[in-house]
Image: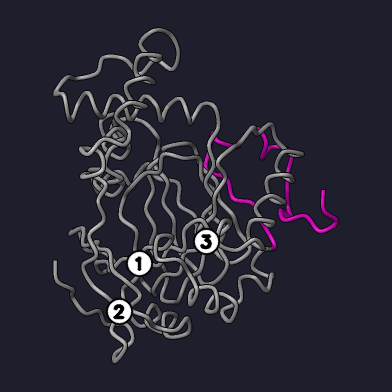
Amino acid sequence: MSQRPIFTNWRENFAALWGQQPTCVDHRLHESPLFSRKQLARLIENYPRTHYSIFHIGEQGTDRRFWREGDLGGLTGEEVFEAVANGRLWLNLQRVNLVDDRYGDLLREMFDELSERIVLESFHESAGILVSSPKAQVYYHADLPAQMLFQLMGRQRIMFYPPQEPFIAPEHLEHIAIADAAIDIPYAEWFDEYARIFEFAPGQMVQWPHSAPYRVENHDCLNVSMAVEYSTSATRRNDIVNLANGILRYQIGWTPRSRALSGPSFLAKAVLGKTLRNSPWIKRRKRRQIAFRLDPHKLGAVVDTAA
């Protein structure tokens, strides 16, 4: 383990809670020059188009799920920061560990440290840097990979919900698997009575149970976070079932009866998913629509693009 561990207040009970309950752990990544505004602005300017997403989102507190994807429009990194600070935007620099080796080294260090603290056989680790506007929100949704979230700048409120019905149902996970439609999960205000709420500040990391729904509300300040996702044997098997059951339910019109993670039905679904994963039907459902670009003349505004 490094002489300066990434996780700075590790307690023995964290290992027992990992993946079972939302758990907050202190870290030191917010002190790293890699996450300074100047360095992140440089990173944004050279970021591959295939590896970033920027979303224009609805006002906090509104029920309507306004969430559309756009383009940075050739702005400098500092202009992008100003646009996010003045708008209702959420920028995700995906797979930063593949784009810049320094973040890849950091990710390996993180998982090496975790492997000394907990039993974690992870693979397909990936990191994304999130830059989001004051009072921005992420609607009620769920992720299929296992997740950690590191707060680096600003403050936000995160609400986690139980990973079970009525908060999330198998058909919701299946729809995410075939269409990347994570924010289409039904939400009711009374769900909040059963949420675990974290007031998230720089120097804190939170991890939560696999596929647990959650939503995010930024405080009135610019936010920067790093999302880390990874797979385990269990999440991989669930992914296989979600994809195959989604194909059966939404393409073939047959309601799946099993979510078994082993046995003959599981093996058949593994073959089905592998065969159709890259089918035109799946690709059409996952196609990205770029609806706007950032306005270079009024930072924070957007300009609609032709369909």
Q: Residue 54, labelled with which disc?
A: 1
Which quadrant of the view contains residue 34?
bottom right
Which quadrant of the view contains residue 111?
top right
Which is closer to the viewer, label 2 or label 3?
Answer: 2
- Label 3 sits on a secondary structure element that is strand
> Mark 3 is on which residue type?
Phe
Look at 69% across and 56% down and name the residue there.
105
Q: Residue 200, labelled with which disc?
A: 3
Please indicate whether residue 121 sits to the left or right of residue 71 in the image: right
Q: Quadrant of the C terminus?
A: bottom left
Mark-to-mark CA distance, 2 and 3? 28 Å
Identify the residue position indicated by label 2 in the image: 294
| Residue 198 x %, y % | 49, 55
| Label pair 2/1, CB-CB below 8 angstroms | yes
Point out the stretch of residues depicted in magenta. Answer: 1-28
Q: Is residue 86 magenta?
A: no
First of labels 2, 3 by sequence position: 3
> Mark 1 is on which residue type?
Ile
Mark-to-mark CA distance, 2 and 1? 9 Å
First of labels 3, 1 by sequence position: 1
| Residue 242 x %, y % | 34, 29
